Amino acid sequence: MNIGLKIALYEPDIPQNTASIIRTCSCLGVNLEIIEPCGFLLSDKRFKRVVMDYMEKDKINFYKSSKDFFNSKKKQRIILITTKAKKSYTDFKFKTNDTILFGRESSGVPENVHKIVNKRLIIPMVNNKRSLNLSTSVAMILSESLKQIKINGN
């Protein structure tokens, strides 16, 4: 199974999270897009330990900059998952060709990215908690979006 839905990571900085997300995307048939620079090298042993043999390079697109990424997406819908949104991801209708963007573990995305994206969504959490682990967030959003796409046939 491979659908048009894509997960995009904005300048990821924790190799184990990125490797875990690669595995999740590989197992669920979803393409991954990585906006560079990354805060680590793909040769990092922490990355290799987690990614194992799930590194399908034909299913991962690398963009040299956020400018390159956004230029390639001019006619596509980009949904940013952020703690700075009000609308819950469970109250949103995902579509097959959406690109779901996640920020850096250490700092999210810059303000200009918030202004460029089509929608901003949040994963609701209990009060006084900052954020979930990035790979956990990706898995949650993928679960909901794939369920909706399968049910609605978008």
Image: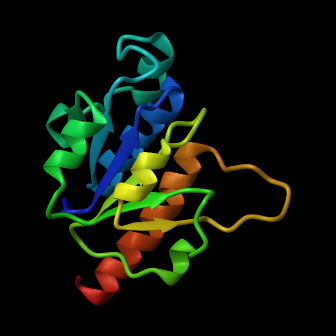
Percent from the top left, x then y, of residue 70?
Answer: 23, 47
Q: Considering depth in this image, is 147 or 106 the residue closer to the camera?
A: 106
Q: Considering depth in this image, is 115 or 153 the residue closer to the camera?
A: 115
> Quick check: 98 left or right of 88?
left
> Quick check: 14 left or right of 142?
right
> Quick check: 122 left or right of 29?
right
Is 120 situated above or below 116?
A: below
Taking the view exactly as shown, the residue that stands out farthest to the bottom is 152
Residue at image x 33%, y 87%?
151
In this orientation, does residue 98 appear? yes
Residue at image x 41%, y 19%?
48
**Quadrant, the N terminus:** bottom left
**Quadrant, the C terminus:** bottom left
Taking the view exactly as shown, the residue that stands out farthest to the right is 128
Residue at image x 30%, y 78%?
149
Q: Quadrant of residue 47?
A: top left
Is 27 situated above or below 148?
A: above
> Quick check: 1 left or right of 122?
left
Is 116 situated above or below 32?
A: below
Q: State how many labels appear.
A: 0
